[in-house]
Image: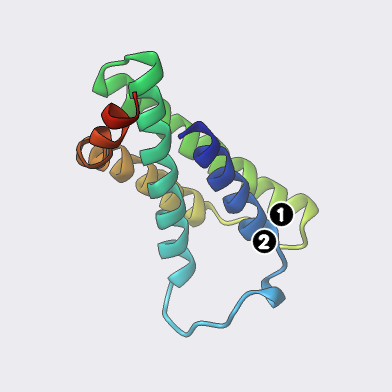
Amino acid sequence: MLILSIIWSILIFVLCTMPTSGLPKIRIPNVDKIVHFGFFFVQSILFSIILYLHANLRLYKILLLTTVLAVFYGGFIEILQDKFFNRQGDIIDVIADTIGGIVGTLVYPLALKCIEPLFRKST
């Protein structure tokens, strides 16, 4: 699960820092906000499961840590976009990242129920 989370985080970074000219043009209003939400939704589920399996934290601590991760990682990417990647940083993207992180964390117990049997079979 840790490897998957790392790969997902790298994928987020690569896709958020690549030139917009390399991205497909989609004519859906605010589609980039939906994408940001989705990226951090999945990342927070993965990170929450890692914390649950390896750190044995209560739900409120997992919610806090994954929210902080979403805010800082999303903000970090937006600052890098603005300063180094010839893209414009956007605070609304950070808000979408944060909301995706929070919702993903709240949904993670359901995701955990779906994948927990896989861990029991392999151990």
**Residue at x 50% of width, y 82% of height:** 26
Would you say 94 lies left or right of 115 here? right
Rendered location of residue 92, percent (x, y): 48, 56
What SS does tag 2 mark? Answer: loop
x, y percentage for residue 98? Answer: 41, 44
Q: Nearer the viewer, residue 111 or 101?
A: 111
Relative image position of residue 20 (x, y in whole percent): 67, 71
Q: Residue at x 57, y 56 (%)?
A: 90
Q: Distance between the residues labelled 2 and 1?
A: 5 Å
Relative placement, left or right, of 57 versus 114 is right
Q: Which of 62 and 98 is in front in this view?
A: 62
Q: What residue is at 57 percent from the left and 83 percent from the top?
A: 25
Residue 41 — which label? Answer: none
Most distant residue in the top direction: 56
Q: In this view, does 6 lie to the left or right of 21?
A: left
Tell which of 15 and 4 is nearer to you.
4
Q: Quadrant of the C terminus?
A: top left
Contact? badges 2 and 1 (CB < 8 Å) = yes
Residue that badge 1 annotates: 82
Q: What residue type is labelled 2?
A: Gln
Q: Which of marks 2 and 1 is nearer the N terminus?
A: 1
Q: Which residue is tagged 2?
A: 88
Q: Is mark 1 on a helix, strand or loop?
A: helix
The image shows residue 53, relative to residue 9, as above or below, that is above
How many discs mark residues in the rendered view? 2
